[in-house]
């Protein structure tokens, strides 16, 4: 029985999915299972994955399109491992990733183990993240400074389900939501000083660029974790700014103005909130700096 299950959710990514699968097959440590969950793809994903099913460690499951959170949850439910690594279908694991995660788990039994990340742009430029990215929530005292990108953490399956797994209502920010719930549970965590994830930036042709999903998810997070945000004003301010910018892009100037003003009041040192509040008072300036998008 493998200790670690790797779960790749995918939707119409047959052109990049092979690289993700191969990155798992090429792992130096070989005792794992890989579950590919096809979230209703309409391309040749199934035919492409069949080429890899000769390896008994690889399995493929198809479901009607329900979103990435449901696909990850489904993969977790049918997994055999005690620990889970989620991997996006256009990212890759570095060759020693599972080895380092397993080594850390075996010696410490942490609930979650974080690693470093290498971001790779479309221009093939790359840079590493070895600490918490500024866009993710972080307490001054006890929120772990890890990176909440799938592939950059390995989580105990029992804990994953005990906090409710991924929220299917979220199509963006679902990892932030998961770790905020874990944070409340006071889970144990550790780090491996190894770059496990190769995260490709700029070729995410889906929800990451969907302003409507970003806005909806941000509003859900702000309401769902209101107690957390009340105690972490700087993080609260950042999320309000993101919501405000989305409102501007949809021409909802009044809602945007409220977000920016509240963000400024929470963190007066961040002048950008005040600047955007001023911009939101003029439809001309708003459209100039933040061109309208249709919902």
Image: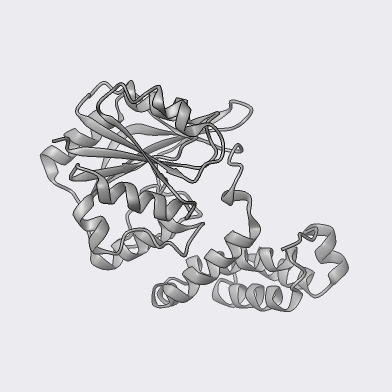
The residue drawn where x is 56% and y is 35% is: 43
Number of numbered discs on residues: 0
Percent position (x, y) of residue 187? 22, 59
Q: Position of residue 104 (x, y in %)?
A: 18, 38
Of 139 and 229, nearer the camera is 229
Q: Is residue 230 above or below residue 159?
A: below
Identify the residue at horizontal 59%, vertical 25% (top origin): 124
Tell me the quarter of the image containing the C terminus.
bottom right
Query: Observer-nearest residue: 195 or 67?
Result: 67
Q: Is residue 154 left or right of residue 65?
A: left
Q: Residue furthest right?
A: 284
Q: Residue 170, percent across and down?
A: 48, 62
Query: Could you tell me if residue 151 is visible in this image?
Result: no
Colour scheme used in the picture?
one colour
Query: What residue is at 25 percent from the left and 33 percent from the top?
Result: 33
Q: Nearer the viewer, residue 209 or 101?
A: 209
Which residue is located at x 50 percent, y 67 percent? 234
Q: Does residue 107 appear left or right of residue 244 in this picture? A: left
Tell me the quadrant of the picture where the N terminus can be found.
Answer: top left
Q: Nearer the viewer, residue 154 or 126?
A: 154
Residue 134 visible in this rendered orientation of the protein: yes
Q: Position of residue 251 (x, y in %)?
A: 77, 69
Is 22 on the left-hand or right-hand side of 105? right
The answer to whether 274 is drawn above or below residue 61 in the figure is: below
């Amino acid at each position: 029985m493998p200790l670690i299950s790797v779960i790749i959710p995918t939707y119409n990514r047959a052109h990049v999915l092979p690289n993700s699968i191969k990155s798992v097959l090429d792992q130096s440590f070989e005792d794992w299972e890989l579950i590919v969950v096809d979230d209703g793809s309409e391309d040749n994903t199934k035919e492409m994955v069949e080429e890899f099913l000769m390896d008994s460690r690889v399995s493929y499951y198809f479901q009607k399109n329900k979103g990435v959170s449901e696909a990850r949850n489904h993969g977790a439910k049918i997994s055999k491992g005690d620990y889970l690594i989620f991997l996006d279908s256009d990212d890759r694991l570095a060759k020693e990733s599972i080895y380092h995660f397993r080594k850390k788990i075996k010696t410490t039994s942490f609930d979650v183990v974080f690693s470093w990340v290498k971001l790779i742009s479309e221009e093939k430029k790359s840079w590493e993240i070895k600490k918490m990215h500024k866009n993710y929530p972080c307490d001054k005292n006890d929120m772990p400074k890890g990176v909440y990108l799938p592939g950059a953490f390995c989580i105990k399956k029992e804990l994953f389900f005990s906090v409710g797994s991924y929220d299917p209502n979220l199509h963006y920010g679902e990892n932030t939501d998961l770790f905020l719930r874990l944070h409340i549970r006071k889970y144990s965590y550790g780090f491996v000083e190894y770059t496990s994830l190769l995260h490709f930036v700029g070729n995410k042709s889906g929800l990451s660029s969907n302003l409507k999903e970003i806005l909806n998810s941000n509003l859900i997070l702000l309401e769902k974790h209101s107690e957390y945000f009340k105690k972490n004003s700087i993080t609260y301010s950042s999320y309000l700014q993101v919501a405000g910018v989305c409102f501007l892009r949809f021409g909802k100037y009044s809602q945007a103005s409220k977000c920016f003003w509240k963000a400024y009041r929470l963190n007066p040192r961040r002048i950008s909130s005040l600047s955007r509040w001023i911009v939101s008072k003029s439809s001309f300036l708003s459209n100039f700096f933040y061109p309208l998008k249709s919902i």
